[in-house]
Image (cartoon, grey):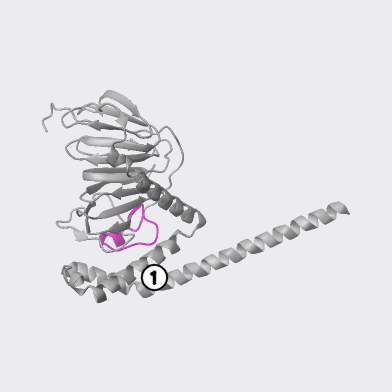
């Protein structure tokens, strides 16, 4: 695109505030395409169909075979024509990638504040972003747009045009020139959308959600329930056990594929077969981790019950002293 052609940019800002926490994950484990049930900033939470992951600097992409594979800056994930993939950030925000889509992880800065930057190279994504506080960012860029979000539920489509639809929250959409100067702003509210047409620099007229966006309300509801459950697990300290259980189920699925669908397994590349075998070898270790987490939970439950009993006795003793 020539320099004198304006680039359209979406800036979506939800007028709410809350908090996001973050810490660095184990980078070494993720570089080999292995899962990590300990904390990671971003990871593959679920996938269906054939999906690929290309690490930063790698010449080729590898098939996604496992859950909870950490993602890092510069990584690219892609879905086939009938595949979907979910990425979770900070155990609090979820992004679902549509079929025939490609997403680049541009920024996962967690040093001074939480700043997440994604680039939707093609296709569509849906997202539920946890409410952010001041100086925290979550952005989605396309060829012609950038969505800067502060806690909302939305969909982004990237093709010849770029569109943003909002399922919840209020969004400010701005058109910017190549120098980043704001040219025009509109506010997109719940159940509305706007589109930037190729080679144009202003957001189009605000309208109601198009039919194909509106029909996906049930998907947004499913994502909302899923991320709510994960946030509750994290608060209760049970998120690691949940991840271990899902990874063990994934291993069982891979084992069934080897036995019941050998043709599919044999169609994998040598490296992909090696990865599957490596995943399956981790089963004893994961079982041991799960048993350890279960013991810790039971111990914690006993401690809570003991505290409750002691507190009750303390209150009863105080009442008796008052009556005397």
Q: Residue beneath label 1, please?
A: 286
Q: Residues within 10 Å of mark 1 (few under 14, many from 20)?
A: some
Q: Is residue 116 visible?
A: yes
* Mark count: 1
Question: Which residue is more in the foreground, 50 or 64?
Answer: 50
Residue 110 visible: no
Magenta region includes residue 296: no
Q: Position of residue 3 (x, y in %)?
A: 13, 29
Which quarter of the figure is the N terminus placed in? top left
Q: Quadrant of residue 290?
A: bottom left
Pick the quarter of the image with the C terminus. Answer: bottom right
Q: Position of residue 240 (x, y in %)?
A: 43, 61
Instruction: Name the residue located 18 percent from the left edge and 53 percent from the top edge.
Output: 57
- Relative image position of residue 202 (x, y in whole percent): 23, 26
- Quadrant of res 152: top left
The stretch in magenta equals 25-43
42 in magenta: yes
């Amino acid at each position: 695109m020539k320099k004198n052609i304006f680039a359209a940019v979406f800036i979506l800002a939800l007028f709410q505030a809350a908090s996001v926490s973050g810490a660095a994950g184990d980078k070494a484990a993720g570089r080999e395409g292995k899962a990590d049930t300990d904390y990671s900033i971003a990871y593959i939470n679920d996938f269906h169909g054939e999906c690929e992951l290309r690490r930063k600097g790698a010449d080729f992409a590898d098939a996604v075979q496992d859950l909870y594979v950490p993602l890092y800056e510069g990584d690219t994930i892609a879905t086939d024509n009938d595949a979907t993939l979910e990425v979770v950030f900070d155990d609090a925000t979820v992004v679902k990638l549509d079929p025939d889509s490609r997403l680049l992880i541009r920024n996962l800065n967690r040093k001074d504040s939480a700043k997440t930057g994604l680039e939707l190279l093609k296709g569509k994504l849906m997202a539920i972003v946890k409410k952010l506080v001041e100086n925290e960012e979550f952005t989605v860029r396309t060829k012609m747009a950038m969505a800067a979000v502060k806690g909302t539920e939305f969909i982004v489509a990237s093709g010849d045009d770029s569109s943003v639809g909002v399922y919840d929250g209020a969004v400010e959409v701005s058109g910017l020139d190549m120098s980043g100067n704001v040219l025009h702003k509109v506010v997109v509210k719940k159940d509305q959308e706007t589109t930037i047409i190729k080679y144009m620099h202003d957001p189009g007229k605000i309208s109601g959600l198009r039919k194909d966006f509106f029909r996906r309300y049930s998907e947004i509801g499913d994502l909302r329930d899923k991320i709510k459950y994960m946030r509750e697990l994290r608060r209760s300290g049970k998120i690691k056990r949940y991840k271990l259980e899902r990874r063990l189920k994934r291993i069982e699925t891979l084992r069934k594929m080897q036995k019941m669908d050998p043709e599919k397994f044999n169609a994998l590349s040598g490296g992909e077969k090696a990865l599957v075998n490596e995943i399956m070898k981790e089963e004893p270790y994961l079982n041991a981790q799960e048993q350890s987490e279960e013991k810790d939970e039971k111990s914690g439950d006993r401690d809570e019950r003991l505290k409750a009993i002691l507190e009750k006795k303390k209150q009863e003793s105080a009442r008796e002293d008052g009556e005397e």
